[in-house]
């Protein structure tokens, strides 16, 4: 039987954990008000299913205890007052919760978070989360994030102002997100300061958003250059100036990171992964993977050097 690689499933989230949502554009998931049976079938299915973040941004915050989160090919340990932020192009997997762990998890679709990103340097966030997606908060900052989170919950669960529900929730999320962004910068003294938007930065931001949505089907730089009405050479030069990587490197990074995560999960065959990433055949995918990693997919799965 063919096993499908599933994106975030809001219905599954709701059955396994407490959930508030605005359609499929914003999902708030937590276990604040009840003890979730992490051994239940629903919880196990959710925890064992890779969450595709290709068109999403996720924010995970541990309020108590400890959790292990798979991000790309790494497993990251998140302790009390620590969080993790992931942007499009990565795969997340909640691999393990320790007893007594309390958490909140916010998943925003591209349609929901794009207006928020327009207020900041999206490329700096992308670069920061690729190198280190974790951050630490002091108790007061954690308390403030939790306060805003609960206000968003109240908004989503209150139908009195239904016509303004989405914009009110987005307003709260903008406050929360910008606060987290400030913490990300604070935790890295050498991080670049946000710069005034210019044409190069705007092009780079739009390129990043485009590859989030299309990198599985389109790995050709010309496709993205045509979307942005510029030449492939100019696109690669602009992206390199603003991110330190050429456009093609960003595309390859996303494809390889996703392939590695899926291979390591051992839930899918190499052929299924090849099909999901839109390669013409399994052998072409294997050659592509070896070119960029130095080993075949099976050798990588076995942990060979």
Image (tube, rainbow, N blue to C red):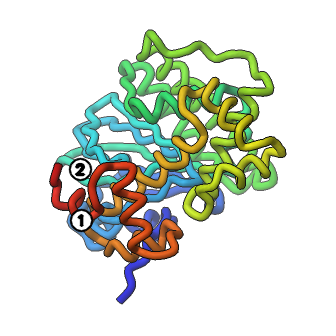
Q: Residue 97 carries which label?
A: 2
Task: Pick whichever, 156 or 204, lies toward us.
Answer: 204
Mark 2 surroundings within 10 Å by alpha-carbon count, few (fewer than 14), some (14 through 19), many (20 or more): some
Task: Pick whichever, 283 or 223, lies toward us.
Answer: 283
**With respect to residue 115, does 48 lie above or below?**
below
Is disc 2 in contact with disc 1, using a CB cutoff of under 8 Å? Answer: no
**Which residue is rendered at x = 49% and y = 49% of the image?**
252
Whether residue 171 is visible? no
**Which residue is rendered at x = 57% and y = 26% of the image?**
124
**Which residue is rendered at x = 31% and y = 43% of the image?**
102
Q: Mark 1 points at which residue?
A: 298
Q: Is residue 18 left or right of residue 117?
A: left
Q: Which x, y percent locates residue 276?
A: 48, 70
- Label 2 to label 1, Cα distance in Å? 29 Å
Which sits earlier in the primary sequence, circle 2 or circle 1? 2
Does dot 1 land on a helix, a strand or a loop? Answer: helix
Q: Which x, y percent locates residue 261?
A: 34, 56
Q: In this view, does 142 lie to the left or right of 239?
A: left
Residue 219 found in image quarter: bottom right
**Which residue is rendered at x = 46% and y = 65% of the image?**
14
Residue farthest to the bottom? 1
**With respect to residue 127, does 86 lie above or below?**
below
Does dot 2 land on a helix, a strand or a loop? Answer: strand
**With respect to residue 59, does 182 lie above or below?**
above
Residue 64 found in image quarter: top left
Q: Which x, y percent locates residue 240?
A: 60, 29
Task: Pick whichever, 206 or 108, lies toward us.
Answer: 206
Give the quarter of the figure containing the N terminus: bottom left
Q: Which x, y percent locates residue 122?
A: 63, 32
**With respect to residue 186, does 236 lie above or below?**
below
Whether residue 228 is visible? yes
């Amino acid at each position: 039987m063919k096993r499908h690689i599933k994106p975030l499933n809001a219905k599954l989230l709701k059955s396994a954990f407490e959930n508030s949502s605005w359609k499929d554009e914003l999902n708030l998931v937590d276990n604040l008000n009840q003890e979730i049976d992490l051994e239940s079938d629903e919880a196990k299915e959710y925890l064992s299913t890779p969450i595709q973040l290709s068109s999403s941004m996720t924010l995970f915050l541990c309020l108590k205890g400890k959790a292990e989160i798979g991000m790309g090919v790494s497993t990251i340990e998140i302790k009390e007052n620590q969080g993790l932020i992931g942007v499009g192009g990565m795969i997340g997997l909640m691999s393990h919760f320790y007893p007594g762990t309390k958490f909140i998890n916010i998943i925003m679709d591209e349609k929901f978070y794009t207006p928020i990103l327009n207020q900041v340097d999206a490329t700096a966030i992308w670069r920061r989360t690729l190198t280190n997606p974790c951050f630490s908060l002091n108790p007061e900052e954690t308390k403030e994030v939790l306060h805003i989170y609960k206000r968003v919950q109240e908004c989503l669960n209150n139908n009195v102002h239904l016509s303004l529900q989405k914009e009110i929730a987005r307003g709260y999320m903008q406050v929360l997100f910008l606060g987290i962004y400030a913490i990300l910068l604070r935790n890295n003294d050498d991080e670049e300061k946000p710069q005034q938007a210019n044409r190069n930065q705007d092009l780079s931001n739009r390129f990043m958003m485009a590859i989030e949505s299309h990198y599985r089907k389109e790995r050709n730089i010309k496709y993205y250059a045509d979307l942005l009405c510029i030449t492939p050479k100019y696109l690669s030069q602009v992206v390199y100036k603003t991110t330190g990587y050429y456009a093609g490197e960003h595309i390859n990074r996303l494809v390889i990171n996703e392939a590695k995560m899926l291979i390591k999960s051992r839930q899918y065959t190499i052929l299924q992964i090849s099909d999901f990433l839109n390669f013409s055949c399994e052998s072409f995918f294997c050659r592509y993977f070896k070119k960029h990693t130095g080993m075949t997919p099976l050798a990588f799965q076995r942990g060979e050097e």
